[in-house]
Amino acid sequence: MIYAVIALLGLIFGSFMNVLIYRIPRGESIVSPASHCPKCNKKLSWYSNIPIVSFILQRGRCRNCGESISIRYPIVELLTSLVFVLIFLQSGGTVESIKYCVMAFLLMAAAFTDLFTSQDAENFPEGGVIPDIYSVGGVLIAYIWAFYDGNLYDSLAGSGTGVFILLIPAVLYQLIRKREGLGLGDIFLMGMVGSFLGSYAVVWVLCAASIIGLVIGFGVLLKTKERNYRLPFAPMIAAGSLLYIFMEL
Ligand SMILES: [Zn+2]
């Protein structure tokens, strides 16, 4: 019963995440205007705005103009729901689960924003965008939580480790290849991971993220033969962190 409630909450938060993913990198307000079709601008009624259900009932099309709705929306909703349920299952439904859900939400929002903007060269010619609001907000939440838990030191040290562990390869890459490999957004995001999970986890997450990145990068290289393709790194950081939560906690 409790897991059904968490799954439902996950869908609702996933739906909110879709709004953030689309609007924050475009500098739009997240409260107004209400959700609307990007093609015909028709405002969505409440029954067109139910996570997953509306997408299935409308067969992935706008009720008004018939424009197809990206499969990304239900995927983000389902993944958020799945991650929330797994976190609660894994951590036994303690109050800590809420902290990890907050972290997972911010990480996934940053990762999907990075992934989708990096594939949208028309609107984002500079490449993937990672809004700093997620990292900065996350670090503050982690510090406050750690302060009340009495382990603020671990959280501070973790965020420092996260920043420095990526700062070094970022600077080296810049010096050797004369172009940016890792952005400040990636560095801040790793700082946030450290503030929630501590220094040891940062090392674990970096290794996992690098392995995932190498495998995917190699796949992209084989498929496109594009040697200068810049792989968005935030999704690897998010995947590595979620793996850590599921396996190590
Ligand atoms: Zn429409």
Image: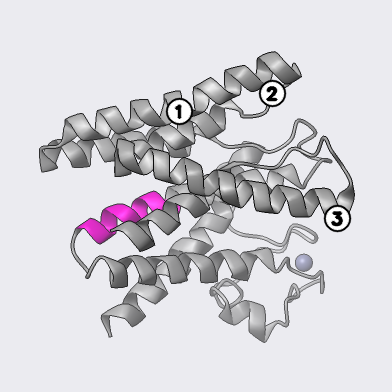
| Label 2 sits on residue | 180
Task: Classify mark 1: helix, strand or loop.
Answer: helix
**Marks 2 and 3: in contact by CB < 8 Å?**
no
In the rendered image, which quarter contains the C terminus? bottom left
- Residue 223 - label: 3
33 in relation to 183, above or below: below
Residue 234 placement, left or right of 116: left
Q: Secondary structure at mark 3?
A: helix
Q: Kindly identify the amino acid type of the residue bearing the numbered disc 3.
A: Lys
**Quadrant location of residue 232?**
top right
Residue at (19% x, 39% y) in the render: 146
Callout 1: 10 Å neighbours few (<14), some, many (20+)? some
Q: Nearer the viewer, residue 130 or 18?
A: 130
| Magenta part of the chain | 96-105
Q: Which residue is mark 1?
A: 165
Label located before the other in sequence (3 or 2): 2
Q: Earlier in the sequence, mark 1 or mark 2?
A: 1
Res. 15 mark: none
Q: In what element is the residue under mark 2?
A: loop
Camera-nearest residue between 212 and 38: 212
Total marks placed: 3
Amino acid at dot 1: Ile
Q: Quadrant of the N terminus?
A: bottom left
